[in-house]
Image: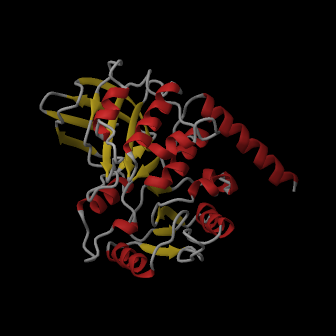
């Protein structure tokens, strides 16, 4: 008991010093044959969709384990809060699991984040992959524990035909140790410039909902990534204003805007589209801005390493985002 208590205190002291020194932890690379855990921390997923993804991952040369409650249904959720948290905790604690792949987003991750204990995970950090609602865990992981994670495609979005799409291929390249470097076309609303900083962010609704909590992200001197889906334009504008009023936009090193998908207008018409709303929110600042980056709720959702240093180069004709 005394040894365990000493180990816990030592580990907490290590975490404090790590955060004070701004040290970021990169999980170990995956190799073929490694074990990947599939969990559903948010909304429910159907068995055929899960089975399709598991079969594809196995064909790629990896082993798969699923949470006990991965296919549960409780109202809109993949099981009760307690069961979803238990599944995620199992994957955090099991050292043989080398990557946790969330099956889908939806809603529910915020309901379990404070039920999770990352102590054993921090002894053997592993990649946590997902996007949308999974932003809740990724922001918490970087802000509280200083660990990188991957904003990337989830099983819900795997091709029904069972083939490997570009987003899946790029994801497994990243978790195998290859730095992603992207060149994308220019957008009319882009603001040219060069900058460098740590990439933070994810889904806008989740980012704003974590302001004032222990999981709130620090954006000062960082490059912020934003994406969103299925929001009314006036609500989207309100969230952008919330970021601005909270000081999350004024000291950015840069802004990367991904998919703003299936955004809807009110009957009277808001006036600006989603991209114009973002441009208006940051018009008084001078950092580089990139729109239409291929990440988010889009067909080819390219992986982004949250917590990793990146170089952003927005030019008149093209944009580069290079991970360090």
- Horizontal and vertical percent position of residue 26: 48, 46
Q: Is residue 40 above or below residue 263?
A: below
Of residue 208 and residue 294, the one placed in the foreground of this image is 208
Q: Is residue 266 left or right of residue 181?
A: right
In the rendered image, which quarter contains the C terminus? Answer: top left
Q: Residue furthest front?
A: 268
Residue at left offset 55%, top offset 53%: 125
Number of marks present in the image shown: 0
Q: Is residue 163 left or right of residue 46?
A: left
Q: Residue furthest left?
A: 317
In the rendered image, which quarter contains the N terminus? Answer: bottom right
Tell me, what colour scheme is on the image? secondary structure
Q: Is residue 89 above or below residue 189?
A: below
- Quadrant for residue 224, please give it: top left
- Quadrant for residue 210, please give it: top right
Q: Is residue 217 visible?
A: yes
- Horizontal and vertical percent position of residue 272: 29, 36
Residue at left offset 34%, top offset 33%: 278
Q: Is residue 289 left or right of residue 123?
A: left
Residue at left offset 50%, top offset 68%: 37
- Horizontal and vertical percent position of residue 243: 48, 31
Of residue 104 and residue 221, the one placed in the foreground of this image is 104
Q: Is residue 179 visible?
A: no
- Quadrant for residue 140, please give it: top right
- Horizontal and vertical percent position of residue 184: 19, 42
Q: Is residue 49 above or below residue 231?
A: below
Of residue 123 and residue 212, the one placed in the foreground of this image is 212
Of residue 257 and residue 268, the one placed in the foreground of this image is 268
């Amino acid at each position: 008991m005394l040894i365990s208590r000493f180990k816990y205190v030592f580990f907490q002291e290590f975490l404090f010093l790590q955060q004070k020194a701004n040290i970021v932890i990169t999980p170990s690379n995956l190799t073929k044959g490694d074990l990947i855990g599939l969990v559903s921390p948010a909304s429910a997923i159907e068995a055929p969709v899960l089975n399709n993804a598991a079969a594809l991952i196995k064909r790629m040369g990896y082993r798969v384990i699923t949470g006990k409650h991965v296919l549960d249904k409780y109202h809109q959720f993949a099981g009760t809060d307690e069961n979803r948290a238990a599944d995620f905790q199992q994957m955090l604690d099991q050292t043989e699991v080398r990557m946790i792949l969330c099956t889908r987003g939806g809603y529910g991750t915020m309901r379990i984040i404070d039920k999770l204990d990352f102590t054993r995970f921090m002894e053997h950090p592993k990649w946590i992959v997902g996007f949308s609602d999974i932003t809740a865990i990724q922001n918490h992981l970087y802000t509280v524990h200083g660990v990188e994670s991957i904003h990337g495609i989830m099983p819900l979005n795997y091709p029904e035909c069972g083939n490997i799409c570009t987003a899946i291929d790029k994801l497994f390249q990243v978790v195998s140790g290859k730095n992603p470097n992207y060149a994308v076309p220019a957008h009319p609303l882009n603001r040219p410039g060069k900058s460098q900083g740590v990439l933070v962010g994810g889904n806008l609704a989740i980012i704003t909902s974590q302001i004032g909590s222990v999981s709130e992200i620090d954006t000062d001197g960082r490059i912020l990534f934003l994406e969103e889906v299925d929001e009314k334009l006036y609500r989207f504008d309100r969230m952008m204003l919330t970021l601005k009023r909270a000081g999350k936009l004024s000291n950015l090193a840069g802004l990367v805007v991904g998919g703003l998908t299936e955004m809807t207008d009110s009957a009277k018409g808001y006036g600006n589209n989603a991209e114009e709303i973002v441009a208006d929110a940051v018009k008084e600042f001078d950092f580089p801005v990139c729109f239409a980056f291929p990440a988010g709720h889009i067909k080819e959702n390219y992986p982004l390493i949250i917590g990793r240093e990146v170089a952003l180069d927005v030019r008149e004709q093209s944009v580069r985002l290079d991970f360090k």
